Image (spheres, rainbow, N blue to C red):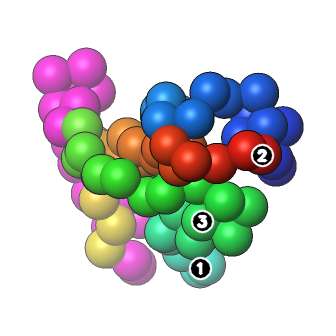
Amino acid sequence: MFTGVLQVLKPGKYCIVNVMDIRKKDRFYPLHADLARRMEEVGFIFDDLIIWDRRQEYNNLRTLGYPAVFRLNRIHEFLLIFKKASDSRA
């Protein structure tokens, strides 16, 4: 997935990925965690994580599925910060 990015990225430089976790019907997918693990598998260093609060943009926080199921709208995204190793030749 990001193998090509790693190959062209200069050593010591960063790749930042903006991602939001998702829910499909009854299944929740922690996309930020899955992506971080995959990025490390291809050779990136997981350098930092920023949780981006988007309440001002969404401005409609409410429960979904009430009264059958209690779900909140997502109001945050994750900025995953990865680094290519300084001594990497990939």
In this figure, which residue is indicated by the disc labeled 2?
90
Is residue 23 among what the camera can see?
no
Q: Residue at x 49, y 57 (%)?
A: 45
Residue drawn at point x = 61 percent, y = 78 percent: 27
Q: Which residue lies at the image location 66% right of the left edge and 60% below the top edge?
A: 43
Which residue in the structure is indicated by mark 1? 26
Relative side of 17 to 41, left or right: left
What residue range appears in magenta?
53-69
Name the one closer to the observer, 35 or 43: 43
> Mark 3: which secondary structure?
helix
Q: Are marks 1 and 3 in contact (CB under 8 Å)?
A: no
Residue labelled with disc 3: 40
Where residue 54 sits, quadrant-wise, is: top left
Q: Earlier in the sequence, mark 1 or mark 3?
A: 1
Disc 1 crowd, CA 10 A, few/some/many (<14, 14-19, 20+):
few
* Residue 57 is inside the magenta segment: yes
Disc 2 versus disc 1: distance between alpha carbons?
40 Å
Q: Is residue 9 magenta?
A: no
Front position in the image: 45 or 71: 45
- Disc ID at residue 52: none
Q: Position of residue 86 (x, y in %)?
A: 50, 43
Quadrant housing residue 66: bottom left
Q: CA distance from mark 1 to mark 3?
A: 28 Å
Going by the numbered disc 3, the residue's amino acid type is: Glu
Give the number of callouts: 3
Distance from the alpha carbon under mark 3 to that under mark 2? 14 Å
Residue type at numbered disc 1: Asp
Residue 48 visible from this viewpoint = yes
Task: Say what amino acid the circle numbered 2 marks.
Answer: Ala
Tag 1 or tag 2, which sits nearer the N-term? 1
Image coordinates of residue 80 in percent, x first then y, are 42, 47
Q: Nearer the viewer, residue 88 or 77?
A: 88
